[in-house]
């Protein structure tokens, strides 16, 4: 088990991230934290606004994509940055889809308090991996900048 929440991997043009967790929920939460860390210093983001997130995917990589894209959409449309990610559940109901339910916490972006990092245009499927091993989960993904 890697003793860190996430790390930035080498990539020639974009941002390549590996996020880790003892569970898939923790790895997905750390993936979201890493994405927002690219955009700002998340330690300066107060958990003042709560959003409830519900996304679906046809497999685990598409669920990871949907999760990160939904957060990026909220950032782009509502101007919210997040620092706390509570994944309530990841499950696959009888329909065969994968479902993620979460609560995320943050506040409106304030450039005077939140240093601007790199602008993220999109989440991509490039080099995307999801390894779901109890006690040692890992996700990898690339952000288009």
Image: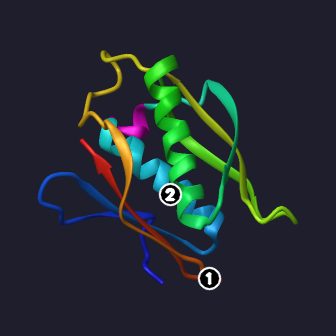
Q: Which residue occupies the foreground of this view, 15 or 103?
A: 15
On the image, the x and y values in percent for residue 90 come to 73, 61
**Residue farthest right in this picture:** 94
Residue 126, compared with residue 110, is above or below; it is below
Residue 46: in sight, yes or no?
yes
**33 in magenta:** no
Asked which quadrant contains residue 113, the reply is: top left
Residue occupying image coordinates x 42% and y 39%: 43
Q: Which residue occupies the foreground of this view, 14 or 24?
A: 14
**41 in magenta:** yes
Residue 18 got which mark?
none
* Magenta stretch, residue numbers: 40-44
Distance from Cα at disc 1 to Cα at disc 2: 15 Å
Q: Which residue occupies the foreground of this view, 46 or 36?
A: 36
Looking at the magenta stretch, what is its main secondary structure? helix
Left or right of 23 in this view: 42: left
- Residue position marked by numbered label 1 in the rendering: 135
- Residue position marked by numbered label 2 in the rendering: 30
Task: Identify the secondary structure beneath mark 2.
Answer: helix
């Amino acid at each position: 088990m890697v003793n860190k929440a996430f790390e930035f991997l080498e990539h020639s043009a974009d941002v390549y991230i590996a996020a880790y967790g003892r569970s898939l929920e923790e790895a997905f939460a750390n993936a979201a934290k890493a994405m927002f860390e690219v955009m700002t210093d998340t330690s300066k983001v107060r958990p003042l606004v709560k959003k409830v997130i519900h996304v679906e995917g046809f497999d685990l990589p598409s669920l990871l994509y949907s999760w990160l894209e939904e957060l990026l959409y909220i950032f782009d449309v509502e101007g919210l940055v997040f620092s706390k990610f509570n994944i309530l559940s990841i499950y696959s109901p009888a329909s065969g889809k994968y479902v993620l339910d979460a609560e995320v916490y943050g506040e409106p972006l304030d450039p005077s308090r939140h240093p601007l990092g790199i602008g993220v245009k999109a989440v991509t499927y490039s080099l995307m991996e999801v390894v779901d091993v109890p006690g040692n989960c890992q996700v990898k993904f690339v952000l288009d900048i």
